[in-house]
Amino acid sequence: MNPRREVMCQDGLRISYVARGEGPVLVMLPAVLQSIRHWEALGYVERFARHNRVIAIDLVGHGESAQPVEPEAYAPEAVSNRVADVLAAEGVEHAVLWGFGRGGETAALTARRRPETVDAVICGGVVPQQDYEFLQKAGVKAIFGPGTNIPEAAQDILQLIREARG
């Protein structure tokens, strides 16, 4: 397993995360009721850390992060602020955020609020096929439907990002 790191966020809550590897930063944000242990067990952290600096974060209420009972601790803006606190603690200037489910919502919100830091967002979940054309016209470079091999899709996306960076 990976050594855990922790950051005390500006709002006083503790967030647990793992940081491994070298290279472009890939931040992994699991879904509700999941923790980074799921992504470690599936081999995602290890696989992506071969070519990237992976920062996998247990969002508040999950894994080894703080488990507050106050509903406001789970507000999307508060969760996004804590992701930014982790990135600041790690000295990250540019990152790709990969979130699944609620982690995808957090990734997208963080990108909107911090466009100078977030180079791209990868959101996992089910996208209805009737939405593909709209998304492509809006600038989405790749859509992966049900049954997609997630590690392969993520590698494809990272390649698109490398190409866009030149």
Image (spheres, helix red, strand yellow):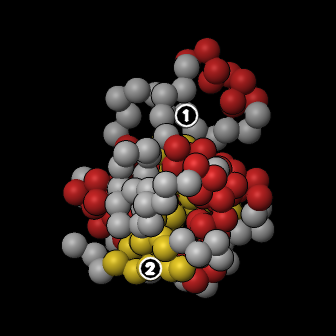
Left or right: residue 12 versus residue 58 is: right
The residue to which callout 1 is attached is 143
Q: Secondary structure at mark 1?
A: loop
Work out whether 114 lies above or below 34: below
Instruction: Check disc 1 and give the amino acid type.
Output: Ile
Q: Position of residue 30 (x, y in %)?
A: 43, 52
Location of the C terminus (image quadrant) = bottom right
Whole-angstrom CA distance, mark 2 to mark 1, is: 33 Å
Q: Residues within 10 Å of mark 2 (few under 14, many from 20)?
A: some
Identity of the residue drawn at 65% across and 59% down = 78
Location of the N terminus (image quadrant) = bottom left
Identity of the residue drawn at 59% across and 66% down = 83
Identity of the residue drawn at 40% across and 26% down = 146
Instruction: Check disc 2 and give the amino acid type.
Output: Glu
Work out whether 104 lies above or below 129: below
The residue to which callout 2 is attached is 6
Q: Position of residue 4 (x, y in %)?
A: 34, 78
Left or right: residue 47 versus residue 105 is: left
Which circle's residue, 2 or 1, is located before the other in the chain? 2
